[in-house]
Image (cartoon, rainbow, N blue to C red):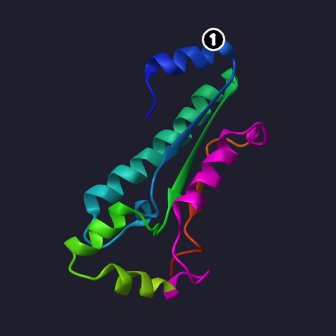
Amino acid sequence: MYSRAAQRYMVQGGYGRIVNVSSSSALGNRGQANYSAVKAGLQGVTKTLAIELGCFGIMVNAVAPGFIETEMTRATTVRVGVGFEEFVARVKAIPVGRSGKPEDIAAAILFFASEEAGFVSGQVLYVAGGPRG
């Protein structure tokens, strides 16, 4: 999350981009009630700040990744007792047939931070390879 000082700076300048990182787990995920609640709350904060800060030229959006191959997801598979390769093999359930890469998330964040996103605010972009079943 950003600081109040950053918000003041953006308000004074009449321009800003805030991109929060949520998760597709905000929609619910077995065994992750606490994590899901936090990520859903972050989406609510994103939408509220978009309403409050839009008049100052500040766009506020969120990116909600699905399964992304990172060190964190590797650690998660170990914690739940499933081999990483086996876990990645399950991505056939993802409509595009592959797991995500950090570059997929970076591209979404880059768009929200760009001039081209000047009329996009209060949105949550699920970067998850398709809708959940």
**Which residue is denoted by mark 1 in the rendering?**
12
Q: Quadrant of residue 104?
A: bottom right
- Bounds of the magenta segment: 92-119
Residue 30 is left or right of residue 22, and the answer is: left
Residue at the image point whose x is 51% and y is 57% from the top = 64
Tag 1, which secondary structure? helix
- Pick the front one: 50 or 21: 21
Badge 1: residue crowd in 10 Å (few <14, some 14–19, many ≥20): few
Q: Is residue 70 magenta?
A: no
Q: Is residue 84 left or right of residue 121?
A: left
Question: What's the magenta bit mostly, secondary-structure-wise?
Answer: helix
Residue 81 lies, in percent from the top left, at 20, 80
Quadrant including the N terminus: top left
Q: Is residue 132 above or below residue 106?
A: below
Total marks placed: 1
Which image quarter: residue 72? Answer: bottom left
Q: Is residue 69 placed above or below 41 in the rendered structure? A: below
Residue 74 image offset from top left, x and y in percent: 32, 69
- Percent position (x, y) of residue 51? 61, 33
- Residue type at the position of mark 1: Gln
Q: Position of residue 69 (x, y in %)?
A: 44, 68
| Residue at figure coordinates x 48%, y 83% from the top left | 91
Image point (26%, 82%), residue name = 82
